[in-house]
Image (cartoon, coloured by chain):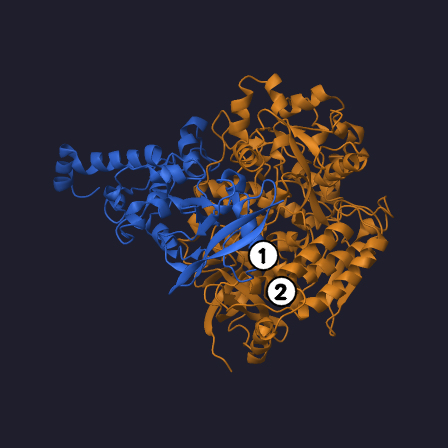
């Protein structure tokens, strides 16, 4: 068994530093295993979030060697051999402690988006009919595990801190999932353009690159939504209708 | 005394997985009822998220012969007839409505050709019955409940851990919790309280369960005077990952077998054909061809033996491994890649039907399941036992204290069928929420909070900081417990081993009483682990004592020293209760007589 060296961010809201830990690395081990071993061996109070350890809950998001990743899905063998592994908390959110950040902003943003509102049932027994091919795109969006890595990597949030006027890739995917749901009847485009700040996104596709669920965030969610915003607000005929016909 | 921030609700729900969320949503629909929801993790991360295969509900979309009676009879047969038949009945009757309700809240299940909810085959279910979304049904369910729930006026307390329930005389009055972020205490006053905290899997070394599943609700309720029932029945899921070591125990969905996956030993033999229990012979295929036709929707075919109940499949796997016919890393082979011989575009089909399995194996084990077999072995998955509740209302013997989901017991008897858990969460989550709200309305002011109870709980919780060093840290004690339970109270049990486990538990309890932690109260996982120990040790003792007493083999409980089912034990359940001196009191209770109309259903379906 080889020994691995890990540089882990330790700190609270005020101050912090990297500390180095050594622990055994066995075959197939992931970064989260190393964190657990370090907790059990030498840093009992090292704060880290995790739940499923199978890439399904999106709790253990962190930056590994500077890349936003899930700790439970990152095999140590896939990192440069023999080199120190750096583990840091996500940067786009305030730090609580060590590897744990305050992601409550995401929960607040979600609440501002109008909820699903289905059309009347298609059948007398209160059920609907949908074809598989009509729901596949939305099923792709609904794979999202809310790890918030896309939020973490997005420069609008990470570098420019525009949390107040931009809801971030996660909530564009969320809005797209609602908007393209065949049964949904709600209108969310105005919110997307206004509070959602979709215009700030300049399609660098960083979010798509880090998505552990491999959702094509930019191509399949954000770009179609941007097109809808353009159709709705910048189409001259529609604009006329809005002026004379009142908001729809 | 110290002043802690206090909160007041009519209904307080502890746990925000499927059952807790569904309970909170239901209670919140009652006008004037204020609902609080406490979750140990972030909202939407609870263990429900890991459920893969689907939600069992007799919708009859994929096979019109299905109905609640067949589902009821399957559930009772799977549970070996020690189930709470009333719960099994309500569950079978109400599950379809609960699934359709999820669709009305935005869930998108996979579809049949005519556009309805598609249903898949699963172990122990006579017809294809599981509504599903690929193999990520739990995520779909929890996200649907979460996204619906956040608009219902429920107050959510994320990353709070409840350390003690508070009582006023006999009835429930609230609880004491601590928030992880700062480590501060909070008191909660409520008129009715629902525990929906999930399972106990972390008492074992090899488990599919997350860190949260430490028997919190079981223990909180037990310490508050509630009875536990059926604790000897622990489900070992037949297919967990076995290699590499770091992923050992992670679940491999039964959906793999539902889609045509087969189990083989190292000699290439489909060993599941070698042992088919008598009560399943009539409905099980006796050749490979028939089994395959079943998985492809041939209604005349009977199901392959890979889809027998989990308890049985797990034992067959253990038998193969012990006989030296296992795979290189101590499991057996589960092969879905073989279906490429039978269907066009097999590779794409596997990825479409089992996307997270594909992902999980390629990322964590470097195995491409469309090309090679997986290595699998049993993993601790689910506890059938839990808080003893009234089947209709989900209330325990403590007035105002309700339980729902995995931490409640009854519906599953000695073994749970796959897919019945998600439907259980919905059906009994709703019922618990409804009746908790009713209880709150009917019981006016609610109980008084007793400061002395708060102080004594707070003192106990902070003690680990006051101790200066201990021989064993919280992680070491937890690991020792997990090793011991795995070894001595696992899939195959004996009197001798379990008696040793009781001695071991006593020793670990003493160590836990002396455990020290370092650091401060802010988001301190070591401290949290130290607090979990009491819960883990309590449920481990409950499992061990019950398993010692039940001198027969039934469902998830297998005794090498009593390999047969006994008539005597088919008529009773085991009950645990905390006695006045703090020791665990064990007794049995006769299973109530089943009404003739339910008996008749079981007879007809035999």
Quarter holding residue A185: top left
Nearer to me, B231 or B482:
B482
* Residue B527 against residue B285 in the figure, above or below: below
Q: Say whether residue B153 is left or right of residue B129.
A: left
* Whether labels 1 and 2 share one chain: yes
Camera sees residue B47: no
Judging from the image, mark 2 belongs to the subunit labelled B
What crowding class fits label 1: few (fewer than 14 Cα within 10 Å), some (14-19), or many (20 or more)? many
Numbered circle sitting on residue B298: none
Q: Place residue B303 in its image quadrant.
A: top right
Q: Counting other residues with Cα less than 10 Å from the Cα at mark 2, is it few (<14), some (14-19), or many (20 or more)?
A: many
Q: Residue at image x 51%, y 28%?
A: B352
Residue B420: where, in percent of width, then height? 62, 43
Residue at image position (45%, 39%) is: A212
Q: Secondary structure at mark 1?
A: loop
Badge 1 vs badge 2, beta-carbon distance below 8 Å:
yes
Q: Horizontally, is B244 left or right of B187 in the view?
A: right
The furthest residue to the front: A82
* Residue farthest along the right direction in this orientation: B561
Above-or-below relation of A218 to B541:
above
**Where does label 2 land, which residue?**
B220
Disc 1 to disc 2, C-alpha distance: 10 Å
Image quadrant where residue B450 sits: bottom right
- Chain ID for blue: A
Mark 1, residue position: B197
Q: Closer to the camera, B317 or B479?
A: B479
């Amino acid at each position: 068994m080889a020994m691995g060296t890990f540089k882990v961010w330790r700190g609270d809201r005020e101050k912090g530093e990297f500390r180095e830990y050594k622990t055994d690395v066995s075959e197939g081990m992931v970064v989260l295993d190393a964190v657990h071993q370090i907790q059990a061996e030498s840093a009992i109070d090292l704060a880290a979030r995790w739940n499923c350890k199978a890439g399904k809950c999106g709790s253990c998001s962190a930056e590994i060697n500077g890349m936003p990743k899930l700790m439970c899905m990152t095999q140590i063998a896939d990192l440069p051999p023999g080199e120190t592994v750096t583990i840091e908390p996500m940067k786009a959110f305030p730090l609580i402690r060590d590897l744990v950040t305050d992601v409550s902003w995401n929960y607040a943003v979600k609440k501002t988006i109008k909820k699903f509102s289905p059309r009347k049932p298609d059948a007398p027994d209160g059920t609907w009919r949908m074809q598989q091919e009509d729901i596949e795109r939305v099923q792709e969006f609904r794979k999202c595990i809310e790890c918030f890595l896309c939020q973490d990597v997005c420069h609008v949030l990470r570098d420019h801190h525009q949390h107040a006027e931009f809801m971030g890739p996660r909530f564009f995917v969320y809005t797209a999932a609602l908007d393209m749901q065949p049964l949904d009847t709600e209108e969310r485009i105005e919110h997307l353009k206004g509070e959602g700040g979709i215009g700030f996104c300049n399609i660098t596709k960083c979010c798509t690159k880090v998505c552990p669920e491999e959702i094509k965030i930019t191509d399949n969610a954000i770009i179609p939504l941007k097109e809808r915003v353009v159709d709705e607000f910048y189409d001259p005929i529609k604009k006329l209708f809005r002026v004379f016909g009142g908001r729809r | 005394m110290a002043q802690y921030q206090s909160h007041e609700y009519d209904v307080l729900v502890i746990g925000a997985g499927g059952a807790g969320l569904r309970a909170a949503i239901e209670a919140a629909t009652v006008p004037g009822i204020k609902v609080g929801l406490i979750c140990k993790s972030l909202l939407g991360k609870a263990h429900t998220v890991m459920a893969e295969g689907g939600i069992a509900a007799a919708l009859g979309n994929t096979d019109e012969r299905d109905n609640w009676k067949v589902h009821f009879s399957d559930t009772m047969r799977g549970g070996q007839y020690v189930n709470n038949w009333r719960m099994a009945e309500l569950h079978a009757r109400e599950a379809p409505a609960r699934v359709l309700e999820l669709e009305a809240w935005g869930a998108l299940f996979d579809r049949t050709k005519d556009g309805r909810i598609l249903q898949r085959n699963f172990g122990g279910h006579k017809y294809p019955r599981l509504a599903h979304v690929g193999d990520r049904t739990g995520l779909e369910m929890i996200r649907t409940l979460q996204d619906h729930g956040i608009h219902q006026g429920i107050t959510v307390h994320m990353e709070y851990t409840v350390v003690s329930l508070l009582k006023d005389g006999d009835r429930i009055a609230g609880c004491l919790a601590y928030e992880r972020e700062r480590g501060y205490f909070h008191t909660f006053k409520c008129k009715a309280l629902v525990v929906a905290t999930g399972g106990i899997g972390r008492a074992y070394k090899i488990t599919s369960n997350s860190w949260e599943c430490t028997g919190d609700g079981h223990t909180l309720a037990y310490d508050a005077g509630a009875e536990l029932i059926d604790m000897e029945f622990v489900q070992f899921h037949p297919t967990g990952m076995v290699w590499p070591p770091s992923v050992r125990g992670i679940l491999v969905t039964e959906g793999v077998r539902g889609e045509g996956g087969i189990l083989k030993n190292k000699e290439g033999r489909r060993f599941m054909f070698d042992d088919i229990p008598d009560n399943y012979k009539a409905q099980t295929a006796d050749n490979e061809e028939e089994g395959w036709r079943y998985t492809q929707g041939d209604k005349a075919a009977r199901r392959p033996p890979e889809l027998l109940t989990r308890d049985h499949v797990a034992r067959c796997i253990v038998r193969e491994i012990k006989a030296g016919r296992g795979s290189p890393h101590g499991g057996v082979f589960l092969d879905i890649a073989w279906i490429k011989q039978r269907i066009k575009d097999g590779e794409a089909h596997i990825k479409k039907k089992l996307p997270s399995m594909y992902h999980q194996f390629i990322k964590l084990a470097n195995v491409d399941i469309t090309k090679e077999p997986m290595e699998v072995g049993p993993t601790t998955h689910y506890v059938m036992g839990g808080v003893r509740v009234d089947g209709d209302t989900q209330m325990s013997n403590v007035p105002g204290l309700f339980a729902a989901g995995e931490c409640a017991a009854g519906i599953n008897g000695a073994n749970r069928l796959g897919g019945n858990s998600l439907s259980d969460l919905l059906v009994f989550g709703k019922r618990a929420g409804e009746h908790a709200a009713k209880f709150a309305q009917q019981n006016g002011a609610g109980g008084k909070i007793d400061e002395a109870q708060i102080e004594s709980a707070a003192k106990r919780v902070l003690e680990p900081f006051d101790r200066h060093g201990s021989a064993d840290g919280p992680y070491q004690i937890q690991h020792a417990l997990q090793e011991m339970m795995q070894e001595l109270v696992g899939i195959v049990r004996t009197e001798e081993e379990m008696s040793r486990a009781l001695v071991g538990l006593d020793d670990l309890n003493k160590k836990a009483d002396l455990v020290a932690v370092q650091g401060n109260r802010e988001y301190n996982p070591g401290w949290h682990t130290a607090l979990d120990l009491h819960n883990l040790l309590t449920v481990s003792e409950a499992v061990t004592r019950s398993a010692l007493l039940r001198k027969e083999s039934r469902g998830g409980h297998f005794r090498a020293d009593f390999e047969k089912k006994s008539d005597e034990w088919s008529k009773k359940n085991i009950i645990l209760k905390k006695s006045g001196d703090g020791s665990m009191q064990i007794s049995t209770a006769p299973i109530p007589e089943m009404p003739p109309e339910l008996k008749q259903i079981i007879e007809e379906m035999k």
